[in-house]
Image (spheres, helix red, strand yellow):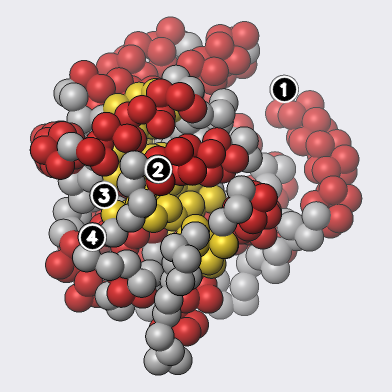
């Protein structure tokens, strides 16, 4: 079976390699994906942490920090598959023997080369990354494989069920599968995984360190002044937006300005490289695009920043990475994107942790359980289309008490669901101690 898998994977890479070259997605770390590790890669029985997205990498940082308390001299290897994720991985890999790498491609020979050289004490995977050759070889070497923050989305579950006969033996090579909800647990059982290996530990993304606006201001420049916002101005932050959403949001903004002339809009596209495309949408709707990166450059140079322009027709575009939380802190109301179009939604926990009123669309299938729990707790608002979004944002802007109450419930809900990181840490600790490589 694995020979066939290797062949299919090889053909897939051959087909898509030219596309990656044409789109200039072949980053310098791609050599690591081929198993070519840096000469100084010599960790000692490390804890290997793997995360794909930026959000998962942030959760892994919390987990790594917690593990370092119990294992202060332990080396860590942190892997991702994207350049953006690798930036956070380098922050996590802060110890003298730590390394940030790219996950090797799932070819048998490449996986064997990398794992033999790293010889990890335990391999921790965020969410549900199923790499057959990697998992099989780790199990063959008796290296514990632990999945944390595991979830089985509606879409994935339908696909997995078709290949249950192939997936079942692979799942049972995983030592512990820590899932977010009971629904995820039942789905794994349905796919043939042994019940005793599945633990419902919750979602580590709830374990955000709650930071208030005052602390965020201390950490960085006064963003409110940076945006040129006056004391009566209100800010609507639309985060993690996708194509098809920005046009709707700009149309809604036009309508909202009639009753809320002091309202300012900041759009943070999910992929910052789309900033130029978003600029064109802003111009087409009669507004002036204002890139946050340019504001930062002016502020650092000591220049005055009339961000929204003298006519107040500016729309801010967040084209940088790592600053979204600061703008969440400034927001009066937040819309989380990828949810009005069929992208599955994005993380609503960060603005919730700051006590912000949150609105999202009906396509939240990637955050199915979290969004449902928020709705049940009255801690968020779901809309089905552009008209409903305009109505809900308008209602929130006109009612200070409603905004405050919704934000308060969101923050309270976050606090009530924390603890997954520590529960996962304890299971990893047990696996490390059993391995004899602690």
380 lies above or below 294 = above
Q: Nearer the viewer, mark 2 or mark 4?
A: 2
**Earlier-in-chain disc, 2 versus 3:** 2
- The residue that appears at 71% across and 43% down in the rendered structure is 107
Q: Nearer the viewer, mark 2 or mark 1?
A: 2
**Earlier-in-chain disc, 1 versus 3:** 1
Between the C-alphas of marks 1 and 4, the distance is 65 Å
Q: Which residue is mark 2?
A: 258
Residue 281 is left or right of residue 10, and the answer is: left
200 lies above or below 219 = above
Residue 304 is left or right of residue 416, and the answer is: right
Q: Nearer the viewer, mark 3 or mark 4?
A: 4
Q: Secondary structure at mark 2?
A: loop
Picture quarter with the C terminus: bottom left
**Earlier-in-chain disc, 2 versus 4:** 4
Q: Secondary structure at mark 1?
A: loop
Q: Residue 153 at what x, y percent from top left? A: 46, 21
Between the C-alphas of marks 2 and 4, the distance is 16 Å
Q: Which residue is mark 3?
A: 332
Q: Secondary structure at mark 3?
A: loop
Q: Which residue is mark 4?
A: 232
- The residue that appears at 56% across and 11% down in the rendered structure is 158
Report the disc number at residue 1.
Answer: 1
Q: Nearer the viewer, mark 2 or mark 3?
A: 2
Between the C-alphas of marks 2 and 3, the distance is 18 Å
385 lies above or below 234 = above
Instruction: Estimate how packed mark 4 is, as few (under 14), some (14 to 19) or many (20 or more) residues with alpha carbons within 10 Å.
Output: few
Residue 275 is left or right of residue 16, and the answer is: left
């Amino acid at each position: 079976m694995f020979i066939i898998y290797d062949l299919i994977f090889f053909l897939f890479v051959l087909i898509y390699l030219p596309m990656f070259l044409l789109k200039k997605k072949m980053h310098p770390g791609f050599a690591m994906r081929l198993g070519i590790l840096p000469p100084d890669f010599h960790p000692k029985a490390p804890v290997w942490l793997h995360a794909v997205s930026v959000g998962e990498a942030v959760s892994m940082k919390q987990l790594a920090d917690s593990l370092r308390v119990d294992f202060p001299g332990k080396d860590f290897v942190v892997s991702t598959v994207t350049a953006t994720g690798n930036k956070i991985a380098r922050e996590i890999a802060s110890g003298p023997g730590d390394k940030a790498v790219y996950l090797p491609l799932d070819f048998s020979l490449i996986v064997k080369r990398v794992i033999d050289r790293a010889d990890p004490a335990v391999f921790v995977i965020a969410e549900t990354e199923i790499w057959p050759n990697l998992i099989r070889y780790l199990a063959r070497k008796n290296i514990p494989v632990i999945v944390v923050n595991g979830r089985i989305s509606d879409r994935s579950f339908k696909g997995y069920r078709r290949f249950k006969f192939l997936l079942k033996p692979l799942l049972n090579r995983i030592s512990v599968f820590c899932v977010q909800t009971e629904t995820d647990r039942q789905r794994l059982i349905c796919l043939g995984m042994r019940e005793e290996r599945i633990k419902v530990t919750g979602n580590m993304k709830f374990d955000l360190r709650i930071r208030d606006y005052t602390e965020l201001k201390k950490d960085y420049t006064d963003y409110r002044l940076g945006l040129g916002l006056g004391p009566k101005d209100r800010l609507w932050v639309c985060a993690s937006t996708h194509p098809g959403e920005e046009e709707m949001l700009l149309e809604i903004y036009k309508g909202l300005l009639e009753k809320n002339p002091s309202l300012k809009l900041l759009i943070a596209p999910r992929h910052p490289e789309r900033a130029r495309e978003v600029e064109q949408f802003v111009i087409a709707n009669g507004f002036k695009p204002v890139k946050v990166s340019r504001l930062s450059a002016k502020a650092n140079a000591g220049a005055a920043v009339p961000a929204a322009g003298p006519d107040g027709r500016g729309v801010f575009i967040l084209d940088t990475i790592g600053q979204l939380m600061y703008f969440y802190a400034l927001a009066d109301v937040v819309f989380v994107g990828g949810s009005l179009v069929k992208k599955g939604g994005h993380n609503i926990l960060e603005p919730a942790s700051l006590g912000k009123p949150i609105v999202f669309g009906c396509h939240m299938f990637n955050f199915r359980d979290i969004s449902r729990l928020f709705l049940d707790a009255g801690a968020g608002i779901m809309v089905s289309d552009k008209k409903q979004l305009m109505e809900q944002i308008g209602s929130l802007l006109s009612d200070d008490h409603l905004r405050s109450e919704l934000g308060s419930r969101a923050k309270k809900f976050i606090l009530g669901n924390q603890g997954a990181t520590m529960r996962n840490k304890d299971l990893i600790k047990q696996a490390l101690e059993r391995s004899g490589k602690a």
